[in-house]
Amino acid sequence: MLSQQEMSDRWEIQDLVFHYAHLIDSKAFDSLRDVFTADAHIDYSAFGGNVGDLESTIAYLKDAVSSGIFPNTQHLNANVQVSVDGDTGTGRVMCFNPMEMTQPDGGTDVFMLGLWYVDEYRRTESGWRISRREEEKSWIFNVPEFMGL
């Protein structure tokens, strides 16, 4: 049976995971400092993205997303699997990520990503934070390509 502390820890981590998605879709990248530890390692390489620390990740996201290349995104998280061991934890989170991508001619394409976040969490004085996040690729679906456009 789970203790009240472990249930609370799991819910706090789940809220953290959902808050991350909200910040990404809101393009509030500076607020990711409230989600990750200062020494976090973040690996977005599964889809050709940045690998590095928190500050390089924030800079990458500002450049890639705020530049207008990805004007609209949604990160829908499900199947949040969390294990807690004292002040650390691990998780695997399913993400469905439809995105709109601006093309060089000004048009847009819609594509969808299926992925998992493979996470490590750490309890800090400010609460639970993600200390490591790695994307694991599942699939990519390009709507215009599928429709023969």
Image (cartoon, grey):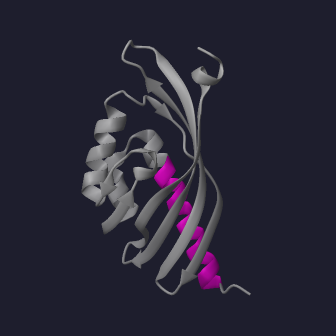
Decide: is 106 above or below 95: above
Q: Residue sitting at 28 percent across and 37 percent down?
A: 63
Q: Magenta stretch mostly in which secondary structure? A: helix
Decide: is 105 above or below 93: above
> Where residue 133 sits: x, y (%)?
44, 62
Q: Quadrant of the C terminus?
A: top right
Decide: is 138 above or below 123: above
> Where residue 60 sits: x, y (%)?
29, 45
Judge whether residue 18 is colored magenta: yes
Q: Is residue 113 left or right of residue 45?
A: right
Residue extent of the magenta highlight = 4-21
Q: Which residue occupies the foreground of this view, 102 or 46?
A: 46
Q: Quadrant of the N terminus?
A: bottom right
> Where residue 47 sits: x, y (%)?
45, 45
> Where residue 103 sits: x, y (%)?
41, 19
Judge whether residue 7 is colored magenta: yes
Q: Residue sitting at 59 percent across and 22 percent down?
A: 145
